[in-house]
Amino acid sequence: MNDRLQRLYNIIKEKDLDGVILTDGYNIDYISGYKGHTGMLLVVNDTSYILTDSRYTEQASLEAKAFEIIDIGMDGYSKTVKRILEEKIEDSHTVSLGFEDKSISYTQYKALSDALGASVSLVELGDVVNKLRMIKSQDEIDLIAKAEAIGDEAFNHIINYIEVGMTEKQVALELEYVMKSLGADGLSFDTIVASGTNSSMPHAVPTDKAIEEGDFVTLDFGCIYKGYCSDMTRTVYMGDEINEKQLDIYNTVLYAQKAALKCIRPGVKCSDIDKIARDFIAEAGYGEYFGHGLGHGVGLYIHEEPRFSKSCDVILEPGMVLSVEPGIYLPGEFGVRIEDLIVVTNDGYENLANSPKVLILM
Ligand SMILES: [Mn+2]
């Protein structure tokens, strides 16, 4: 049995369950290797299954070799789960089945609980399976580093490409084209290119707006390489006459990030790292303009556990990979965000992003 499946069995044992149903496609991939993102992972007693439909059964059997692949056919998921439970569990005790309450729709949940009836109790797993993914193996770190290196190369290209008069969409397309040309399999999220007043919206969508002299341009982008995501943000300035307020905000974001980075090492609580950057920005007078968390875990999925946020009490351990991305956003004016991706090491951290962070005047 692979180590990851063993860790799922440990959860089943610790929680005194008869089995689990996983519905989060990334967790199913992590545990089984099946990357189809359509289906269900079911463990009952000592047997593990991937349930999916005929579009994916061949893929699942190639990728999830340790699993029995079940075609749900016309029965659908709920009836198939019920049939397997009846086959596998002979005595009449109430069956406890863990399920991923954070990644199931109400309709799916209702279909499942209706089909299984009163003899099966569905137990919420919360994010206990997601947390198995927090500490990355060296192989995973290497793939994330490669994805981030593609991002660095794309940034290096784009700063020689952007010119006043180009639209945000045009720049976003170029970033995506370059990342895919460099070997990316896909994008880890929709590329953000936000210029001028648009940059005050942290998750702005690229528009047909032309980039103008005097604009900040926030570039937030990442790619997927062999299943693993990258994420980075740089903010550049169009022109060479930056005003004092713009410069002050850029430097406040940059030094807030540096202050937080300096404290990253095993044993430190995630919320304490968030607080360092947040306090720094508040002391500079921009506290109310930094609304989001400082960072998030990155791996198979772009936003995963743990988080650099006020409420995350996870203690940093070697192998965790997180973004560090403070920002200041003045509605109707402009915004600045700078984001690196780090891996926690035995005595500190390694920055996987290598693009310059000094203000680039284009
Ligand atoms: Mn991010």
Image (cartoon, grey):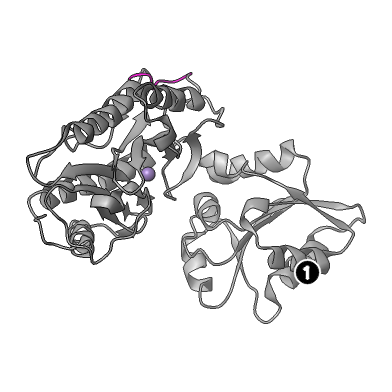
Magenta span: chief secondary structure: loop
- Identified by mark 1, the residue type is Arg
> In this picture, is 335 found above or below 254?
below
Q: Secondary structure at mark 1?
A: helix
> Which of the pair 14/345 is nearer the observer?
345
Seen at 34% across and 37% down, the residue is 328
Seen at 26% across and 55% down, the residue is 193
The answer to whether residue 9 is left or right of residue 265 is: right
For label 1, being within 8 Å of ligand 1 is answered no
Q: Which residue carries the number 1 mark? A: 83
98 in the magenta segment: no
Q: Is residue 221 among the parts visible in the rendering? A: no
Seen at 37% across and 48% down, the residue is 202
For the view shown, which residue lies furthest in the bottom direction?
74
Residue 183 location, quadrant: bottom left
Quadrant where the C terminus lies? top left
Q: Is residue 155 among the parts visible in the rendering? A: yes
Residue 52 location, quadrant: bottom right
265 in the magenta segment: yes
The answer to whether residue 62 is left or right of residue 181 is: right
Seen at 82% across and 67% down, the residue is 114
How many marks do you count on the picture? 1
Look at the image and give the residue range highlighted in magenta.
262-267
